Image (tube, rainbow, N blue to C red):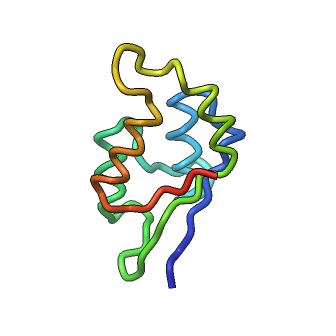
Amino acid sequence: MTRIIQIDGRKIKTAKDFYREIGRAVNGPDGYFGNNLDALADCLRGGFGTPADEPFEFDWQHSDLSRRHLRDEMRGRATFLDAVRNVFDDAGVPLHMR
């Protein structure tokens, strides 16, 4: 069975909010699951709260709201949301935007 980890996009207005929310979603209040893209990649590869013996994926609820808030992050390069998607893709972890 696949574990679904839900991220609440209503709580995400900045990149810092994203890391706080994904940490909470995986490891509970004040949980850690990266604080930059490199650390997120490390966490997605295992050992930081994700199940070691079963598949898992992320369900980013209210992602349209997050997208509006995050669209200005990382100006001049890929958007923050694009960068996050690339990290998930590279790690082979599904990220569903709802």
Question: Residue drawn at (52%, 50%), measured in percent from left and top?
Answer: 23
Q: Nearer the viewer, residue 85 or 18?
A: 85
Q: Nearer the viewer, residue 85 or 52?
A: 85
How many numbered discs, if any?
A: 0
Q: Nearer the viewer, residue 41 or 66?
A: 66
Question: Residue drawn at (56%, 69%), measured in percent from left and top?
Answer: 4
Question: Residue drawn at (47%, 49%), measured in percent from left and top?
Answer: 32
Q: Is residue 50 above or below residue 7?
A: below
Q: Position of residue 18 (x, y in %)?
A: 54, 38
Question: Residue drawn at (54%, 57%), measured in percent from left and top?
Answer: 96
Q: Position of residue 56 (x, y in %)?
A: 46, 71
Say whether residue 94 is left or right of residue 47. right
Q: Residue furthest top?
A: 76
Say whether residue 90 is left or right of residue 25. left
Say whether residue 75 is left or right of residue 92. right
Q: Is residue 59 above or below residue 41?
A: below
Q: Position of residue 39 (x, y in %)?
A: 32, 44
Quarter location, residue 52: bottom left
Q: Position of residue 1 (x, y in %)?
A: 51, 85
Q: Is residue 50 above or below residue 83?
A: below
Quarter location, residue 68: top right
Q: Is residue 87 above or below residue 58?
A: above
